[in-house]
Each structure stands twice: as structure tokens, then as C-alpha cells.
Amino acid sequence: MNNLKSLSDKIFSLEPGEFESVALKVFDFQANENELYRAYIRHLGIDVSEVNTMEKIPFLPIEFFKSHIIKSGNWSTEGYFESSGTTGSITSKHYYPQTDFYLKNCQKGFNQFYGDVDEYVWLALLPSYLERSHSSLVAMVDHFIKKSGAKESGFFLHDHDLLIEALKEVRRAKKRVVLLGVTFALMDIAEKTSFDFPDLIVMETGGMKGKRDELVRNDVHDLLKDKFGVDRVHSEYGMTELFSQAYSKEEGIFYPARTMKVMTRDINDPFNISDDLKSGVLNVIDLANLHSCSFIETKDLGRVHSNGSFEVLGRMDNSDVRGCNLMLA
């Protein structure tokens, strides 16, 4: 199994217990077919033939998405997703051969935890994402909205009154609803009204920086639970550099999609990766990153539990420094 098509088919038909064997096959493919990753492995002095467990796989610093086009295999670029950033900052770009691969994986990931995407009305409140181009989150939610086919589904930019009316309508109709939004925008809505809507799935995607005073997660969730009349707040964990998502149904405990595994590395030794390290900096294996790189060192601090779930505890300070120091000439 050494080509994109066979690996792609295997990833989408992944069975429990197969993750490590498929991950090692993806590593073997990318170590040979990804010029940047191959050079990085060589820079580290790692013998590819000796990588026979997931813990031995080298993880690519996420900063490389800011400086390189990362491709595994021979394919033509259809487009790219781009991270947000302040004016003048360098953003990450994640190139892909076709959006269908990404969207299919997103849908399978959501279905794994919540059931079919098309069984829900999707109300999306993503102002900071809609106001820029090439957002992977907007592409995913747009796909979900189209799959739902519900007349109430859609994006709501700044028209909060229209969103409030849509919420009232779907509550009266007793429809299954996901209200997905950036945290600051959900709080804006919560301050304008209150609901008794216990069946509503309120799902926040993070995002407070520069919009509101930073609050701890529990305070944010308590406010949203009170204002929407729900007993829990859900969360989505994703990023431009990853094609898979993880979901939390309460308390900030995330469960990764089948195509994703989260590990920790020692904050002082980035090459110390072990299941025995329950807390540290998060490394992610994302099999859906087949066309780019599936082994990513993130900047997120976190805790991984024995059942594979994880928490995000914050971000590394000076997180760009190590990646820049290891950039290849």
C-alpha cells in the first residue's frame, strides 16, 4: 500500500485497532514522497527503517505551514486553507488537491459523535471567519449547511435579531439544531436574549482574542448554559493545519475523530514523546493530512487521558522560537 489512492481508501474505512498500522504506512509514504518532511527527517538524523511505532515517528513543527508548501505525492493544487492573523503577520497555508477529501472527512468525524449531519438545522455564527477568505472552518460548516437542506440553516454575520428569530422558529418546530459559533459572538447573542431550549446543541469553536476580555472556559460555559437553557456547552477543536476535528460534549474533554490521535511531548524535550506523558505539548497524528503531513507538533499545551480523549490547557510561550531555529536552509 504505497500510493495515495490505496491509502485514502484505507483511511476512510479505518477499523478500530488499525490506527497504528495505517499511521506507519502513511509515515513511510510521506517520508519518501514529501520533500520537506524527508529533509526534516534527514536533518534530525533519523533512519526511516527504524521507525516501527508511533512514538518513534518524528513530528513536523507546525511553523513550517507558514514558510513552505507542504505536499506528499504528485498532485495539482486546487486551493488552500489559510489561518487567521493580525495585519502583516505570516499566516499558515494548508494546500489540498481537492476539497471533497476534506469535506468527506469532516462529515464522517461529526457523524461519529452526533449522527448524520443532514439531520440537523445548522445556525452558524462565525463573523471573524466569514470576513476573510480560505477558512477551513467556513468550508466545513458551509458543507454541513448544504447537506442539512433545512430552510432555516445558514450563516448569520452581524444580524443577531435574525438569528434569535431563527432560534425561536426551530424551537417551536422541535427540530434538532446546532448553534455553532465563535465564543465572543455566542456571548454577544447570549447578552441580548435568553432561551429555554434544552435540546439545542450550543457549540463554541473558541475565539475571544481582541474581541472581549479573556474569560476562563467554565465562566463562559456557565453564561452560555444559563442564557440558552442548556445543561452543557459543546466545543470543536480544529485548526488550519489539520483536516480532522475533535469534539467535546462537556467540560472541555475532547474526543478525536477516528482519523486523529493526540499525544504529548515533554515541554523541555520535544523529541520525548510517550503515552506515559499525560501532560505536555500536544502532538497530533492526523491521517486525513495524507496529502500534506500527518504528523504535526502543535503549540497547544494539554493533557491526554488513557481513553484517548484530551484537554487543551493553553498555548506555549514563545511558541515560534523552536520551529524557526529548526527551519531548513
Image: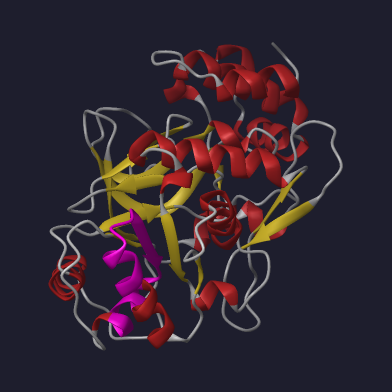
**Horizontal side of residue 222 vs 269, given as left or right:** left
State which region is magenta.
Answer: 167-189
Q: Quadrant of residue 235?
A: bottom left
Image location (x, y in percent) of residue 161:
39, 87
Foreground of the two, 35 or 70: 70
Image location (x, y in percent) of residue 173:
31, 62
Image location (x, y in percent) of residue 112:
39, 34
Q: Is residue 188 above or below residue 319?
A: below
The answer to whether residue 47 is magenta is no
Q: Is residue 49 above or below residue 150?
A: above
**Horizontal side of residue 296 vs 181, given as left or right:** right
Q: Quadrant of residue 289?
A: top right
Image location (x, y in percent) of residue 155:
52, 71
**Horizontal side of residue 216 vs 97, given as left or right:** left
The colour mode here is secondary structure
The answer to whether residue 176 is magenta is yes
**Horizontal side of residue 268 vs 14, given as left or right:** left
Residue in the picture at 60% in, 34% down: 44
Foreground of the two, 23 or 301: 23
Q: Is residue 291 visible?
A: yes
Q: Quadrant of residue 32?
A: top right
Q: Is residue 60 above or below residue 241?
A: above
Residue in the picture at 34% in, 38% down: 113
Residue in the picture at 30% in, 74% down: 168
Question: Which residue extends farthest front?
Answer: 173
> Which quadrant is the N terminus positioned in?
top right
Q: Is residue 47 visible?
A: no
Say how many tags the image has. Answer: 0
Residue in the picture at 43% in, 83% down: 162
